[in-house]
Each structure stands twice: as structure tokens, then as C-alpha cells.
Image: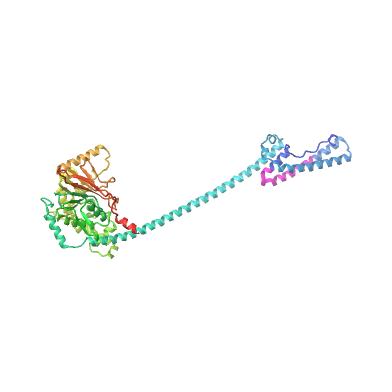
Amino acid sequence: MAAEAGGAAPPAAPGPGSQYGTYVEAVEILGDEGEDSEEHDDQCEEGEDEEDEGEDEEDDGEEGEEDEEDGEEEDEATDDEEEEGEEGDEGELEEVDPVYLQTAVYRNVPNVGRVYDWKLQHEVNQALSKQRKQQAQMEKVMEAARVQLQVREANERAFQQWLVTKKTEKQQQHQEHRRIAYVTSVYRSLTKDDPTEQKAREALWASTSASPRGSDAQDPPTYVTATGRIIAIGDLHGDLDKAVESLKLGGVLSVGEEGEVSWVGGDTVVVQLGDVLDRGDVEIGIVNLLRFLDTEARKHGGAVYMLNGNHESLNVCGDFRYVTPGAFAESAMYSGLSEDDLKDWQLVARVRYALFKPGGEMARELSRNPTVLIVNDTVFAHGGLLPTHVEYGVERLNREVAAWMRGDETPDGQKSPPPFLAMGDANSVMWNRSLSKERFATPFERYHACRALQQALAKVQGKRLVVGHTPQLTGANCECDDQVWRIDVGMSYGVLNRPVQVLEIAPSADGEPKVRIIRNRSGSLSSIDDDLASSL
């Protein structure tokens, strides 16, 4: 009715397509920020009322006086429309779709609507920024928790490792005590002081056909004649069990039910390649066992020889870096110390030095061992043999090493020095490894080594060389067209604890000896370490 009279229509209720309704719809997206938007809506509604009243006054001025009834009807109609608009607004707020903000209708609102859009976007950005900050703070908390968990796990692993280390140390201490007890029992059974046996041994040594030719009876032999088999045994390094197993494998030793040993090799000659000392606990026991078997073997035409290796020369020099605590205890017991004295390690070290220094009891015993031994046409040396050694003289090397170990004096009153070619450097007899390489670096290196060996053997009328010193990972083997045999297999538990292997050189009907390697097919004898571990 008012519209027909030419008056301005009241403002329409804000809806989805209006500039004000667009803002109202956006308020629904803000969530927690809705209170500020509601206050803004109230201000907008008040402004609308004021504009409506101004329009009415202008219409009244231009149209003239209106009937009071028409005005009342218009006011009532306006109030009805405002109430309907408010109800419509409330309904639209409940049905707002956020996607609507991206529609073309929302983007094409008048300029005043765009101002409201900017404010809405600012508030949205603030809400998103707050959310990102909370998320970043939460990630920091989670990262700190992960680091703390990792630290806790690392501490737990370190503690468990510490427990394992302590347990291992305790087992090693217990094992060390059992080793000393074992060495003590072996010492008591093998190191009996029998002057009669010692004198008989010296008499046999001087009268046997295997004595050195043209040298003093105190000097070790150089040339030996064997009528039967020859058994060669590699480095033993203080492992009594492997020493017994090697002799049994070679068919020269029998062990009774009560542990008594006897020679069963007849006229067999046994050559041990040296390095009986170091890395194991029973050194003097092995030396005494070999000496005892030598006495028994000579009664049947055989013999047992032990060469001097680099570890024998180290101990005579006073270098005990490879001596085990058990071996220290054994030498102390051999010297007459009690078990209580073993706690004084300085005393034990001084006793060992007195035993093995040049002129000491064990040094004099080792002086009886040759450095180079030639049995028939087979040459035995611990490390190797070069043409320079032969030119110097193998008998001369044996005499000079023996004189040094005995502590003999030279004509000018000085102590006999050790011969350099026997033990001085890597090219010496005891330390040489040029012939012990399982794989030569180049064909030239192999040719040079084999050629030097051929020249050395020709000078001593030998056909083959047998060496130890260098453990062979593939087992005992030969090289240079069977002219050199390497038989150190690291059998000692102080080295590689490998199965026992020995070399046999047996005579044949055609006069050419047969050389073969005897292996322990059933496995090696358990070492003292294995016995102790099983008893813990």
C-alpha cells in the first residue's frame, strides 16, 4: 500500500544474495569468533532503522500530509517485515554452506560488502595462524618426548651392556683361577726332579748316532740320520692338549687310563718346529714332555727334537709381552714358589726373567735346541732358509744361538751376542715369512722366493724345507713344486684353536720318501679354554 503511494519501500530482509546477508553467512565459519560478528550485526541493524526513518521523513515532505491511518499501517507493515527478516536471518545462519563464500554471487557483492569481506578474511587468517602455532607447539612437545624416549632406550642398552661386561669379567677371573690350578697340577705331574733320569738323558744325548757331527756335545745337532718315519709338528704355543693330540696323531704317543704316557713310535724321529712358548699356559710342561719322550724314543732308535723359534728367542731376550698369567704361574712353580707367592706379580716376573735370561735354567735347556735341523734330505727351520743363511753356515748359526742362550763368554770376556741372521730381522731364520705366503702378490714374487729356496737347498743337499711360524688358514700345504711345506695351522687355543695336523715323511721301497699331511678327521682335542667354559 505504501509502495503504491509512491513511498520508498522498507529495506528488504538480509538474505543469501544481499550484501548484508553475505556477511551474516560468513559469521558461521568463524566459530569461536562469532561473538564479535554478532555485535557488528547489531550495529548494522541500528543503522538500517535510522536510514528507514530518514526516508520516511523525506517522503512525507514531498508527498504532503498522509493519513495517519496509512502511516500506522506502513509502520505496522515495516515492523512485520523486520520481524520476518530477523526470522529469516536466523534460519539462514543455520543453513550456511561454507562453499557459498567461493561462489560468484559472493564475489559480486557491492563495494560495502567487499569491505566486510576483507575484515572476515583477516579474522579467518588470524584463526588459521593460531591453529598453526598450536600445531607447531604440539609438534615440539612430541619431538621432545621422542628424544626423551630415545635417551631412555640408549641408557637402558648401555646398562645392559655394562651388566654383560661385568659378567664376562667375572667369568674371566674365575677362568684365570682355574687355569692356574690346572697349570699347577700339570707342573706337579710333569716336572719331577729325577737326577738319575737327567744323567741318563745326557749320556744318551752324547752317545747316540743322532749327535752333531764334529761339534761340542753341548751344541745342538745340525745333521741327523733317520731310519724310520719322520713326523713334523708345527707351533704349539703352550697348549698341552694339542701337543698330546699331535703326538697321538703322528702315532708315537700312547696315553693310559690314568694319564701315563709312553712312546710307541719305534725308530720314528719327531721334529717340533719351535714356538712352544707364549700364548698358552703350559710351556715348561710341554718342554719336559718332549724331553721325556726323547729319552724313551732313543731306546728304540728314534728321537724327539725341538727347534728354537722366534718366541723362544723373545723370552731369552726378556720380552714377555705374549706370556699368559698361567705361564707366569707355571714358571714360578717350576722355580719353587708356593701358591701364595703367585699373588706377588713382581716376584713372579722376576723369577721368570731369572729362568729365561741367557745362562738361566730354562735358557740353558732351550740352548740344546737347534735353529736349523737337517734330517736325511729334509731341512727344518722355524721361519725359513735363505742362501745367505747357508753361506753364513747353518752349523755356525746353531752354535752361536746356543752360546748366547747359555750365557757363554767370548775370548775377550764379553757375553756371546745373538747372531743377527738367526733372529735379528724379518729375513732371519726365525722371523722369515717369504716362503709362508698362501698367495703370492705377483708371479715374480713367487718365482723369486722359490728360486732362492732352490739355491739354499742345493747348498745343503736338501730336497725339501719344512717351516712353521705363519699360521696357514687353509691348513698345512706345500708350494714351489713341493719344495717347501708349511705346517703351522694355528692349532693352539691361544692362536686359532684349529684342528691338529702333522706332516709325515715315510721311507719307500724305491728310495724316494713319501710326504703326506695327516689330519684329525674327527675334530681337534678340546683345549683347556673349552673345558673351563663347559664347567662354568
Q: Give the percent coordinates (x, y) of residue 286.
A: 23, 56
Is 36 inside the magenta-drawn segment?
Answer: yes
Is 56 inside the magenta-drawn segment?
Answer: no
Q: Give the percent coordinates (x, y) of residue 119.
A: 67, 41
Q: In the picture provided, is 178 more to the left or to the right than 104?
A: left
Name which residue lies at 71% across and 40% down: 23
Tell which of 279 and 53 is nearer to you.
279
Q: Give the percent coordinates (x, y) of residue 106.
A: 69, 36
Tell which of 283 and 147 is nearer to you.
283
Q: In the picture provided, is 286 more to the left or to the right than 27?
A: left
Q: Give the percent coordinates (x, y) of residue 314.
A: 23, 53
Q: How is the image coloured?
A: rainbow
Tell which of 371 and 237 is nearer to you.
237
Dividing the picture into quadrants, the one containing residue 330 is bottom left
* Residue 384 in view here: no
Name which residue lies at 86% across and 40% down: 71
Tell which of 274 and 249 is nearer to you.
249
Image quadrant in which the C terminus is located: bottom left
Q: From this viewpoint, which residue is outermost toward the left? A: 214
* Residue 209 in view here: yes
Name which residue lies at 83% across and 40% down: 77
Magenta segment = 28-51
The image shows a total of numbered marks equal to 0
Examine the rendered structure and indicate whether residue 356 appears above or below residue 471. below
Image quadrant in which the N terminus is located: top right
Dividing the picture into quadrants, the one containing residue 196 is bottom left
Dividing the picture into quadrants, the one containing residue 98 is top right
From the image, give the main secondary structure of the stretch colored magenta.
helix
